[in-house]
Amino acid sequence: MKQLLIFIRKEFYHVLRDRKVLLILFGMPVVQVLLFGFALSSEVKDSRLVVVDYARDYASQQIITKIEASRYFDVEKNLLNHAQIEASFQEGKVKAAIVFPENFQENLLRNNKPQVQIIVDATDVNTGNLVNNYLNAILLDYQAEQNKLAKMPYQIVAETRMLYNPQLKGAPNFVPGVMAMVLLLVCVMMTAIAIVKEKETGTMEVLLVSPMRPAMVIISKAVPYLVLSLINLGAILLLSIYVLDVPVKGSLFLLLAESTLFIITCLTLGILISIQTNSQQVAMLISLMGMMLPTLMLSGFMFPIENMPLPLQVVSNIVPAKWYYTIVKAVMIKGAGFGAVWKETLILLGITLVFFGVSVKKFKIRLQ
Amino acid sequence: MRTLILLLRKEFRQIFRNKAILRIAMIVPIMQFLILPQAANYEFKNINLVVVDNDHSSYSRLMISKIVGSGYFRLVDNANSYKEAYAYVETDKADIILEIPPHFERNLIRENSQKVFLAVNAINGTKAGLGGNYLGRILADFNKDILLELAPNATVGNLDIATTAWFNPDINYKLFLIPGILAILVTMIGGFLTALNIVKEKEVGTIEQINVSPISKRDFILGKLIPFWILAMVVFTNGLILGYLIYDIVPQGSILLLYSFVAVYLFAILGFGLLVSTFCDTQQQAMFIMFFFMMIFMLMSGLFTPIESMPNWAQWICAFNPVTYLIQVIRMVMLKASSLEDVLPQLRVIAAMAVVLNSWAILNYRKTS
């Protein structure tokens, strides 16, 4: 036990000695959480829209005013005819066009189902879809208003409540995602070089001839980084609560405990990479290039997992960030208790144990 | 010139000697390129729905079957109470709760109007918006059916909304994502390898040998840049070939234009890696700094979230992000068949970045410590 403590102290010296790395380690997550917390949002505001109004009657004007009043659109200008739409799309800024046919109001009142045409620029599919949906919602809303005014019988009115995030802000979705991403990459990268660096500089021999057992070496390597990561976690949480306005709805203790578990998962993953590789460069490339995009895309925070093809849904299960992201969302945003996340916790724990077991097993006590 | 060729030969020998790195640099991008584009799909087909039917009338049942029949929703369960349904949302098993109040059918007919309640899990705003929207449309449709049945002459104000998607009529998500993934992979390979390579010479100490040799700064830096430039070009070519073979994407515009742009772009990115390496003493430092910028390059490039949705200051960051321009140009040339004239603004910005970053790096590189 005393030996272990001494080794941990040695590792601490190593970590604290490199001031530049320390500065980056603490500065980077803070800057990233702030930056992405404010900047990322899947809501499209002020999209430019062009109108082709062949009708020019009261009803079409009413709809256009309604569109102008929503915060989603900037109604750019009125075009005279269809042909001008393409030109305005090619200029690049206009995202959508809406076309009202002639005699719009008349047909509407006579119940001839006049056709409103929406045209979106689908080179950016996401924006195109969103814009189309906003426009659809506005039109349906108009229709419902009209029906109410006309005292239509047998109306079904849907009353919608947005749970957890009534203003549909981006932050409640992106803060857990960015947390998972930043913690994972920082932790994996830090430990990924821990052992391989000793191999590269030759100090590994000293470690190997010492009476330390592999498990002890691994633990002493991980502990300093665990402490650093916990400080980082604290900073990220404070920022998200006080600056980004995303409070912890559930139990803070539970969130901290789950985060600690996730940090340990990432640290052991880093150690595993470190043990398997022979040079710092390889370890870094694996932990960065190998982890960055898959974590971002398969953790469910950018793209919904249930929409992926089945093989990819299976693959996503081995991405630790997926489970952590689910847990943070449940505890922090929904305010759920342990009962809702015990399964995810068990899986994370299982992944950690596998990583740790493989690391201990693969740890070679001989050079070459 | 001769020194440059000798230096290049040395660099290539070093690159080819380290099989592990070469393997990662070639295989990881290919693997990710094969897997990741499949992940993106915002077309919500299986929105999980829980129904709390307090009425159990023929109308309420008809409504539910109409919703499920639409194909957008998957009925997870018929819950007995809102509380029970809420538990599904809490554990992420359901996204939307539809609650039909007691006496729904009776009140609808007697009182002419009746509410149904929707509760949407809105953590992911996009998903919530879309799901609520689909459900709203289906309910409106159902309402029309009922009206036709009960009061055939009463309907007014119905619109027929027709949507057309231009430039990507099938709403193909892969078409939209592949240029972005390709851009990020090329950037990562070029940037990381350059930054790490030079710092490694510093860390191991071999850089001193170069410093005391009569090799000029220019030759040294070109000797470092050219091999990784070629490597990144190979990665890009692999991407194009795979895009054609697997995803059936044929560039609509000129391939020559695409390559010329990437050629200039790579000098900007390699220059950036070089610049980072001049500021660092250890590979660890270089890697963390590159990681920091790569995250920003990736998330602020308009690939995952639209740039228009960002606040003004963030849009400025995007304007200084080289990846933004690469994604734009690949999309324009590959999908819209844009010409040199169309991409000239982007080309100018990238060329300027290349010049600034490389000269800064050369200025900052000291042969004496």
Image: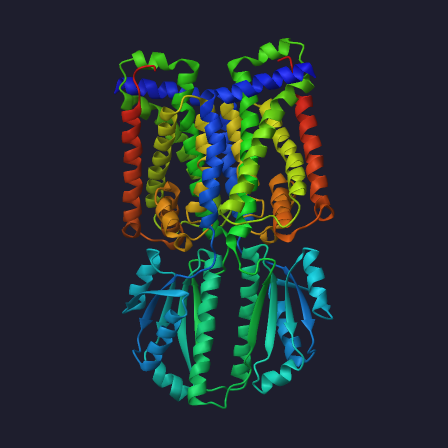
The answer to whether residue B56 is left or right of residue A184 is: left
- Residue found at x 48% / y 56%: B42
Residue B225 locus on image (x, y percent):
62, 25
Q: Quadrant of residue B197 in the image?
A: top right
- Residue found at x 48% / y 62%: B129
Query: Is residue A304 placed above or below B27 in the rendered structure?
Result: below
- Residue found at x 52% / y 33%: B291
The answer to whether residue B19 is left or right of residue A63 is: left
Query: In the picture, which quadrant includes the N terminus of chain A?
Result: top left
Q: Which of B300 and A115 is in front in this view?
A: A115
Query: Is residue A135 placed above or below A187 in the rendered structure?
Result: below
Query: Is residue A304 placed above or below B193 in the rendered structure?
Result: below
Residue A350 locus on image (x, y percent):
27, 39
Q: Which of B179 and A200 is in front in this view?
A: B179
Query: Is residue A4 placed above or below B59 in the rendered structure?
Result: above
Q: Which colour scheme is used?
A: rainbow
Is there any visible trace of residue A296 in the rendered image?
Answer: no
Q: Report the number of numbered marks.
A: 0
Residue B107 locus on image (x, y percent):
37, 84
Q: Nearer the viewer, residue B258 or A79?
A: B258
Is there any visible trace of residue A325 in the rendered image?
Answer: yes
Q: Quadrant of residue B273 in the image?
A: top right
The answer to whether residue B40 is left or right of residue B49 is: right
Residue A83 locus on image (x, y percent):
71, 67
**Residue sitting farthest toward the front:** B245
- Residue found at x 31% / y 21%: A217
Query: In the picture, which quadrant includes the C terminus of chain A?
Result: top left
